[in-house]
Image (cartoon, coloured by chain):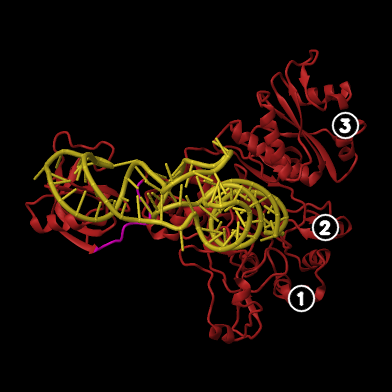
Amino acid sequence: MRSHHCGDINSSDIGKDIEISGWVHKRRDHGGVIFLDVRDLHGIVQVVCNPDHPNTFDLADSCRSEFVINIKGLVRARIEGAINSKMATGEVEIEAKDLVIFSKAVTPKFPLDDYQEVNEDIRLKNRFLDLRRPEVSGRLLKRSKITSRIRSVLEGNNFHEIETPILTRATPEGARDYLVPSRVHPGEFFALPQSPQLFKQLLMVGGLDKYYQIARCFRDEDLRADRQPEFTQVDIEASFVTTEDIINLAEQMISTLLSEFTNYTIGEIPRITYKEAIAHYGCDKPDLRIPLQLKDISELVKNEEFKVFSGPANDPASRVVALRVPKASGLTRKNIDEYTDFVGKLGAKGLAYIKVVALGEENGLQSPILKFLQQETIDAITSGLQVENDDIIFFGAGNANTVNLSMSSLIKKLGEELDLITCEWAPCWIVDFPMFERTKENQLTSLHHPFTLPAVSAEELRSNPDEALACAYDFVLNGYELGGGSLRVFDPIMQSEIFSILGISPDEAEEKFGFLLSALSSGCPPHGGIAFGLDRIVMLLSGTTNIRDVIAFPKTQSASCLLTDAPGEVTAEQLEELHIKLTIDKEDKE
RNA sequence: GGUCCGGUAGUUCAAUUUGGUUAGAACGCCGCCCUGUCACGGCGGAGGUUGCGAGUUCGAGUCUCGUCCGGAUCGCCA
């Protein structure tokens, strides 16, 4: 149905009889001549229809936007003065000899040109139209190329792509599962995988040595700009490997992508311990493009009268930090009030600040809190931060989690709003994660997952679980967690110990993870791996800030599909067959 | 579950601050004209339950409450 793609036709085709198929992008009717811009995935070309071919001319007259047509005609050079330098195919045009309308189209629900932004919900409702826009299709094509390149790097390292089940069983820890009722097992449910974690470990026990998969994962949790209920992981696992082996492989993959899809050549990637990351950035996914760091000043303000600082400084669950922002003293009272509101919404009680106007001079510092602090404390803070004139210092004091959240968010906000971003790409590894963290109920829970190899012995783990580190690592790029992994437990005794520390009884461990313990007992190689979020990788390499842009049919923030209107109700017969009785009825829902 | 932003013609927006005549514009759409345009042009025309529901008021797109939808974010996401 075609000899050429629309966007590929150029001067070298002049004089050829060709055939193209595509969509009517624009129609310009001049009465005696009709121009049709015909578009396919590869671009747009101008077709000229004139009354020399009466049938064709009449059909062209009836064409409207988004009609799907076929043109047979002659490529010719455009006449003098009619060359369009803005168009890739602007030097040529097609003189239409035959025109076939394959498919008529109603007026599009929104314009498909680049001259008007269209709201996302309308685009999602009509995604099949949205996909015709080069901006959208281009990102999906890029995704395809990225995926292909990832495969080639992994294949080049002797990794094998192996599929794992989508229908599997629910796991007690982790995210909320998507459940699928079993018809043949009344009252029982499959769960969709949150990740292929256990299966890839079992592949290692099975001796498959090096595995990868472009794996769809499902988590029934609330959505964010970078979180969809179903998403894609580049899932990797290998046997007889150290942390260095995995990190080297991951760096090879990432540097390949960055060099091929951006002009960035990756250098030494810094490694930051989890502890340092929290201390300096307040989070475990710092955006290193922003040159701002927190400095702990708890020791300096411990003995101050100022309770806002000294209170948290003397509480082990709290911290007091200072954030020096260079050359920011131009911030107005209104600006600072806005930042105070911003951190307030994240739980901070306030946002103390000092403006550095003229260091070392009388009244050289401006701040409402100066009168509460001893001069030597102020001097220690300013010299410790190496402040200069025109800097501003922000302070965070209170519960450590609140300070970390509010101040790390403030760093990211200041970085964007004050244009402090120093470079385009800033990767890093976060290493030495703790094995466990405490829930609000003070229960121990895995920071990574329960199969992570501890960096300590089983005895040390039990005696001091709060301090135990894990053989786990996260890859962070520009403030996004792109990937994370670990070495895995390969000793059934250690694995049982971890379940026990997590409060999973031996009976429950046997019921839920018996197959894993049995596998670990049957000759398990030391192994480890990593998983990258493919959607986020493509998002960053596409220069966008939400993963809906790189997914063909994404879901909205309320986890529904505006195109298909999923999820939807099912018939009573379907429910009965699945032995399911609803506890709500339609009236309740509405 | 919480906080914040938004919802007006097919689309993108204005009118909301300070409630007041018939809710405007651009693009798109329809008709007529036009043989060199390319975001073609000219003339004419159609198109609105201001998301939905209450309330306040002589009067609501505008104020209040509720609700639905979309987005950002906290909680949540081993």
Same-chain status of marks 3 and 2? yes
Q: Quadrant of residue A199?
A: bottom right
Write the residue at 87% across / 38% down. Answer: A313
Q: Which residue is mark 1?
A: A510
Q: Is residue A505 visible?
A: yes
Say left or right for A563 vs A430.
Answer: left
Quadrant of the image containing the C terminus of chain A: bottom right
Q: Quadrant of residue A206?
A: bottom right
* A473 is within the stretch colored magenta: no
CA gap between label 3 and label 1 equals: 51 Å
Q: Nearer the viewer, mark 1 or mark 2?
A: 1
Amino acid on which disc 2 is placed: Ser
Q: Which residues are magenta?
A: A103-113
In the image, A498 versus A587, the foreground residue is A587
Determine whether A278 is above or below A548 in the image.
above
Q: Find chain A in the image and tell me its colour.
A: red
In the image, A427 versus A244, the foreground residue is A427
Q: Nearer the viewer, mark 3 or mark 2?
A: 3
Q: Chain of mark 1?
A: A
Same-chain status of marks 1 and 2? yes
Q: Residues within 10 Å of mark 3 (few under 14, many from 20)?
A: many
Q: Which residue is mark 2?
A: A457
> Where residue A509 sits in the image (x, y, percent)?
77, 72
CA gap between label 3 and label 2 equals: 38 Å
Mark 2 falls on what kind of element? loop
Q: Residues within 10 Å of mark 1 (few under 14, many from 20)?
A: some
Amino acid on which disc 1 is placed: Glu
Mark 1 falls on what kind of element? helix
| Prevailing secondary structure class for the magenta stretch in the rendered image | loop
Mark 3 falls on what kind of element? helix
Q: Which mark is residue A447?
A: none
* A105 is within the stretch colored magenta: yes
